[in-house]
Amino acid sequence: MIGRVSATAAVTAGHLRLKSAPGRWTIAATVLGSGMAFLDATVVNVALPAIAKDFDADLATLQWTVNAYTLTLAGLLILGGALGDRLGRRRVFVAGAIWFAAASVLCAAAPTSETLIAARALQGVGGALLTPGSLAILEASFQEDDRGGAIGAWSGLGGIAGAVGPFVGGYLVQAWSWRLIFLINVPLAAAVVVVSLRHVPESMDTEARKQPLDVAGGVLGALGLAGLTFALTEGPARGWTEPLVLVPMIAGILLLAAFIAVERSRSNPLMPLSLFRIRQFSAANVVTVAVYAALGATIFLLPIQLQVVLGYSPVEAGAALVPLTIVLLLLSSRAGRLAQRIGPRLPMTVGPLVAAAGVALLSRVGAGSSYAADVLPAVLVWALGMSLTVAPLTAAALGAAGPRHSGVAAAINNDAARVAGLLAVAVVPALAGLSTAGTIDPSAFSDGFHTALLIAAGLLAAGGVLAFLTMPGKPREEPAGRCYHSCPLDAPPPAPDPERAATAS
């Protein structure tokens, strides 16, 4: 049974040691589990041209292939963390792995694009159970003096997975089929389940169990986001006055307004609105939206441009993004330590501006461009800017909220990043004049790609300017040794370690 602790896993939560066998197995389980959810948000981008070819799909279909996953993941992420706190973090984590694997099989077997999109939405539900649980398990399972090392190991191993993921995904697409990128989740999920049941101790928040779960808030937020995203994705092709677009848009706005009203009235809201009265917290999340909207739009469009216009193979397109992850993995922690010494304003200003320059350089990539002279330099400049931005941005958001609210602040900042990418994939192609109907025409797509990446560069530049105007120039007083870890590629900046709770509830 999912909820039963086996004899092997009978180590008391909060007492694991990093160098013990149960400790290493626990890290392995959380890395594999969260890695599945993170990688599926990036590897699929490399497979989009192959999916379009198999299903004769238009750009709108590819948008939904990406957004269906992100939509349910973002909409249910905070609720997933809250369920883990109340029902048991290991239990919900394992349930998420099983759900994710089952949805992955449905994705691999999808006979039509519509079925694939529905299965991707189901995958996002599993991801919402997996993602907050991984860090929460580490926070709850390890002794206090080992938590920092455990989360550091999680971050480093996750970074390596992020670096090789797009390349491996491209190889599988090219050598066999795009369907295999979903089937590889099945053995990974099986390993997560077995290792978790045998080695990961169960934990839960006994205080949270005394509070009623804010189900209404979670449902209203998810449905409102779904309606708005559907309208923004379908509006350019169908027309903004069409009932199929207008009704979901109005419904989405009303549902999100109801979500805010419910959260304001609850004593135990999923998203405490009082946090947004803190100027630095609100500003950091607005910068998060700008930065990760640009990231989401660029990562969505670049692999298509490389394959459809420049003739790259899936392996080559996947490998083109590897330097981004490697630079982030190598430099993000250093940028976080720098921000602790000098304050977040300088790195959060310079970082987005440098990233904007890199994305602007990428906008020039087109037919006849070479990887060494055109793509790689632009990716490296983009990566350098992002590495200066990610960790200080996470630290600014969580530091403003304070230790008491660090868990929910991490979840809000995580969700802001995912929602930004979700809306960017829906909106930026339309703003760039990319037609979402019919097959993808290389010449027309390339023209729209250039405009779309200039929009993304503008978002990054706006984020840098906002950071300069709102972020403090001096570092906040923090206990020595505290640092912040961020997932290197796929949007969500997870919670810090070790004193700040890493739960996403």
Image: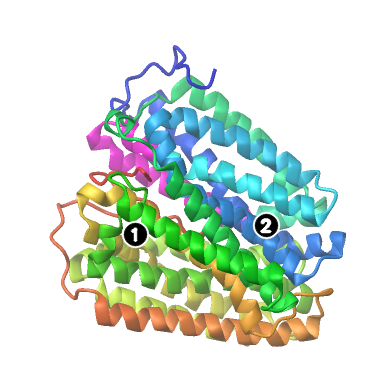
Magenta segment: 136-165
Q: Residue 271: image x %, image y %?
A: 35, 53
The x, y position of residue 321, in whole percent, is 60, 66
In this image, 95 relative to 482: left or right? right
- CA gap, disc 1 and disc 2: 27 Å
Q: How many marks?
A: 2
- Dot 2, crowdedness within 10 Å: few (<14), some or many (≥20)? many
Q: Is residue 73 magenta?
A: no
Task: Give the mark nearest the N terminus, 1 or 2.
Answer: 2
241 shown above or below 128: below
Magenta stretch containing residue 139, yes or no?
yes
| Secondary structure character of the magenta stretch overall | helix
- At x 74%, y 75%, the residue is 238
Q: Nearer the viewer, mark 1 or mark 2?
A: 2
Q: Where in the figure is residue 485, as x and y percent of width and height?
A: 36, 53
Frontmost residue, 244 versus 149: 244
In which quadrant of the rendered view does residue 241 lie? bottom right
Q: Amino acid at mark 2?
A: Val
> Where, by quadrant of the figure, is residue 122 drawn?
top right
Rendered position, 449 above or below 206? below
Characterize the local packing of mark 1: few (<14), some (14-19) or many (20 or more) Cα atoms within 10 angstroms.
Answer: many
Instruction: Using the rendered image of the protein, determine whether residue 299 is visible from the camera's viewpoint.
Output: no
Mark carried by residue 44: 2
SS at mark 2? helix
Residue in the foreground of this view, choosing between 321 and 397: 397
Q: Which residue is mark 1?
A: 333
Residue drawn at point x = 32 percent, y = 26 percent: 16
Indicate the amino acid at tag 1: Ser
